[in-house]
Image: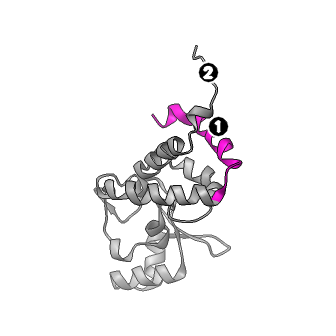
Amino acid sequence: MALSRQDENDAFRQFLKNRDSETIDNIVFELNSTIEQQIDCTQCGACCKGLMINVTQEESESVANYFKIPVSAFKEKYIEEGESGLMIINTIPCHFLDEKKCTIYENRFNECREFPHLHKPNFNDRLFGTLIHYSICPIIYNVVEQLKIEMQFFKNQPLIEKI
């Protein structure tokens, strides 16, 4: 269903550009707090199967400590490090996904903790990136679809006849 709504979501993005960001943020926060409680991420794991995860030096040290291995060994086995020092997990899906659950959940990376980022301000500024994950994350999908209703997006759209 997500793929069939790509044009609709592009139109929705344009629609939201001219709306008050603070109002949108407040609606998204409320929707997220309700919808997030209804979704059991351990039954999905799609984010862990498809996202590239950035890792900080501190997180590398923390997870290496969790595994009781030197940071250098952790990085060698699990991290790809760019010349600029940017570090990412070196495989997709994530090494630490087992079935649909994170094996280092208590020590997971901040980017994992924050996903799908719907609790953060400036939703409009992040909408393009959010919509990239619309097809993989049930939380994002449901928040966006409910936001369309809350913003009366469909009432403002001209009817387009499908051929």
* Residue located farthest toward the right when viewing the structure as drawn: 18
**Is 15 in the magenta?**
yes
Which element type, helix, strand or loop, lies under badge 2? loop
Main SS class of the magenta portion in the image: helix
Across and down, in percent, residue 134 comes to 50, 46
Mark 1: which secondary structure?
Answer: helix
Question: Residue 10, position in %: x, y?
Answer: 63, 39
Separation of marks 1 and 2 at Cα, in angstroms = 12 Å
Q: Is residue 92 visible?
A: no
Residue at x 60%, y 17% (from the top left corner): 161
Pick the residue in front: 143 or 108: 143
Numbered range of the magenta stretch: 1-21
Horizontal relation, residue 157 to residue 117: left or right: right
Note whether residue 138 is visible.
yes
Determine the residue positioned at 59% across, 65% down: 121
Give the x, y percent position of residue 53: 50, 64
Residue at numbered disc 1: 11
Q: Residues within 10 Å of mark 1 (few under 14, many from 20)?
A: few
Kindly identify which residue carries mark 2: 160
